[in-house]
Image (tube, rainbow, N blue to C red):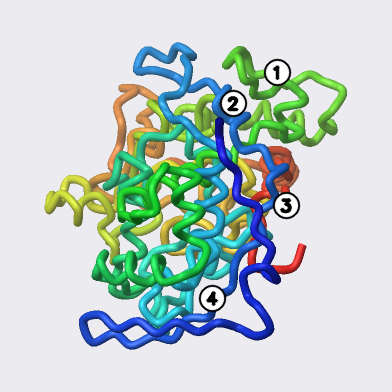
Amino acid sequence: MKKTIFIWTASVITGCALFVSCKKENHAVTLTDEAPYLNPAYNYESVNEVLTTNASGQFVANTHTVTNAGASLGRALFYDKKLSDNNMVACASCHKQEFAFADNVSFSNGFNGGQTTRNSMAIVNAITSSGFFWDNRTIKLEDMVLQPIRHQVEMGLTSSDFMVEKLSATSYYPQLFQAAFGTTNITKEEVGSALAQFLYSMFSQNSRADQAGVISASGGGWNTTNSILTVEEQQGASLFQGLECTDCHAGTDVRGWNNGLTWGDVGLDSVYKDNGLGALLSNPAFNGVFKVPSLRNIALTAPYFHDGRYTTLDQVVDHYNSGVMYNANLSMEFLAIDPITRQPLKQAKTLGLTSYQKGCLVAFLKTLTDYNYTDPKFSDPYKNQ
């Protein structure tokens, strides 16, 4: 039988706050033993029914398992600033619920005031994804969630032992780990698993575009004639398909093919300051190449691209219409084609869209937003609910 921990702050903290002091590797920290309120009625396990696609594009059962106890623990960890070196930031500091778990600034602030060098990506349908970060450097979500915790700018907890010590010193985490994993012995692997389960449970597939059948759970069709979208939104959907935007933003998650393991150079610069995948591989042939992100919830996740350079969807559409810059690694989709030889030229193509057409594209993109992210089961459990 599964156990569910129902923690009331008042039952854990009697009279006044309980303070715990930890010291590890010259880190000194004072922690307030504030227990989260985790509602036992919240159901995270329904996400286990989600289908994903295999390498052949066939829909199959996903390979991840989410439990209510595991995701509830992950929720507590996601919002807990104890996962940073000086208790100043949490995962939620850079992935904010009101922005569909993206950040509303180009670069996020780390635990000690430093800034990240890339825009914080939105969290959307991680359970059907196989690649994470802008350079797709991590395949498993359980590994990815630990990297910001250890990062010298983001959260600064370079010692896993110190993280375990901080969590073990609380009055409630041992109980939560017992419920989720059957042991009070906290490990970094269990921290990664719990955080991943919480993120896996954030599943979005009820946008107006879904309801209209433009994109569907069964993967069939691209329906642009319906009674749900406005005329402008339907025309935007037709343009999105006709301009072959679906070559990159594909499938039910409107992101790169093969469960998100797709990347490209979209011509943001002729010479990149951040070389993306090229820096990771130490290969100039991949300079300027970045992950193709999902477009779900895009109306809420500005600013856009790896460096957050654009603050509006109008600017994004303008970029693809006439602002793509040629460079040696520019993806084929953005190269101009010689009208006679049909061979790609060493220049970027332009789309020649009218103002009305650009407006229709923006209108359609906004229909990809699903307000499932506002569900209270994804909210901060340290606030009185």
- Residue toward you, 61 or 153: 61
Q: Which residue is mark 3?
A: 376
Residue 222 lies left or right of residue 134; in this view the side is right
Above or below for 323 versus 27: above
Alpha-carbon span between mark 3 and mark 1 = 32 Å
Query: Mark 1: which amino acid?
Result: Asn
Above or below for 11 versus 243: below
Residue 11 lies left or right of residue 256; in this view the side is right
Query: Mark 4: which amino acid?
Result: Asp
Comes first in the chain, label 4 or label 3: 4
Q: Which residue is mark 4?
A: 33
Q: Mark 2 or 3, which is nearer the eye? A: 3
- Residue toward you, 366 or 93: 93
Q: Which residue is mark 1?
A: 223
Comes first in the chain, label 3 or label 1: 1
Q: Residue at x 67, y 68 (%)?
A: 11
User: Residue 318 at x, y = what percent?
Assistant: 58, 52
Alpha-carbon span between mark 2 and mark 3 = 35 Å
Q: Which residue is mark 2?
A: 241
Alpha-carbon span between mark 4 and mark 3 = 23 Å
